[in-house]
Image (cartoon, rainbow, N blue to C red):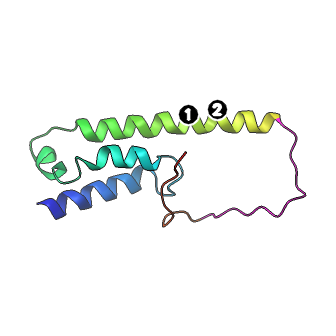
Amino acid sequence: MRHFSAKIFDRYLNLLDYSHNVLLASDVEQFAKKKTVLGDELRTGKLDVFYDLYNLAQKRRFERYQYALKVLERPMDFTGNDTFNLDRSKAPWAER
């Protein structure tokens, strides 16, 4: 059951944040304590962890939105050699 629970946890995280650009590593670590019991909780109808993770992902999305608006207030500088990784699905979770 632990393996099944871990798969549920990993799949749900990837559904919420496929590109690993919303949730933080500390968020994932905080909820990882429940990783081995999610199957049991799902079977008994206890969905608190799922709702809590969803709400946290929404909160982080709003924080990113607010940050993006602040960045857009500044003039853009296109003189650097910055790069952007479009597929972050295998990237680690952000630290902050």
Tally the marks: 2
In the image shown, does 69 or 31 lie closer to the viewer? 31
Q: Quadrant of the N terminus?
A: bottom left
Say whether residue 41 is left or right of residue 14. Answer: left
Q: Residue at x 69, y 39 (%)?
A: 68
- The image quadrant that residue 48 belongs to is top left
Instruction: Read off the residue under disc 1.
Output: 62
- The image quadrant that residue 87 belongs to is bottom right
Instruction: Report the span colored magenta.
Output: 74-86
Up the image or down, 32 lies above or below 53; here it is below
Tell me which amino acid carries mark 2.
Answer: Gln
Up the image or down, 95 lies above or below 75; here it is below
The residue lying furthest to the right in this view is 79
In the image shown, does 47 or 30 lie closer to the viewer? 30
Identify the element where label 2 is drawn: helix
Whole-percent x, y for residue 69 in the image: 71, 34
Is residue 18 rendered magenta in the image?
Answer: no
Q: Would you say the magenta stretch is mainly helix, strand or loop? A: loop
Instruction: Read off the residue under disc 2.
Output: 66
Whole-percent x, y for residue 32 in the image: 29, 50
User: Are the two marked residues, 2 and 1, in contact with CB atoms closer than 8 angstroms?
Assistant: yes
- The image quadrant that residue 9 belongs to is bottom left
Q: Residue at x 11, y 49 (%)?
A: 40
Whole-percent x, y for residue 43 in the image: 10, 47
Say whether residue 58 is left or right of residue 28. Answer: right
Identify the element where label 1 is drawn: helix
Q: Residue at x 35, y 40 (%)?
A: 53
